[in-house]
Amino acid sequence: MAKALLGYVGGSDPRVLSEMRRLQQRVQDLESELIRMQAENDMLSAAARRDDSVLDIDVPQAEPALT
């Protein structure tokens, strides 16, 4: 009965196994890319925080813009 529900009789289809391996590899590749991008984002965020320290300087009165 279970075999009839699955639509085939016999062992696993090699095409299905090949596709499953390909998809598993793709998932691993995407996970690696995600880790790399998270590390890059953390590095860029840290650099942005360092650059923001210049903006923390108190200026008693705004200077006029040059025209």
Image (cartoon, rainbow, N blue to C red):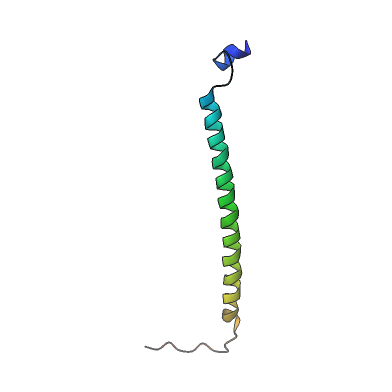
Give the quadrant of the C terminus: bottom left
Viewer-side residue, 9 vs 53: 9
Viewer-side residue, 15 vs 52: 15
Q: Position of residue 34 (x, y in %)?
A: 57, 52
Q: Position of residue 6 (x, y in %)?
A: 57, 17
Where residue 60 sits, quadrant-wise, is bottom right
Q: Is residue 33 above or below residue 20?
A: below
Viewer-side residue, 31 vs 48: 31
Q: Among all residues in the image, which is located at the extreme right? A: 2
Give the quadrant of the N terminus: top right
Q: Position of residue 8 (x, y in %)?
A: 55, 14
Q: Among all residues in the image, which is located at the extreme left? A: 67
Q: Position of residue 55 (x, y in %)?
A: 57, 79
Q: Residue at x 58, y 11 (%)?
A: 4
Q: Among all residues in the image, which is located at the extreme top? A: 1
Q: Is residue 59 above or below residue 25?
A: below
Q: Residue at x 59, y 47 (%)?
A: 31
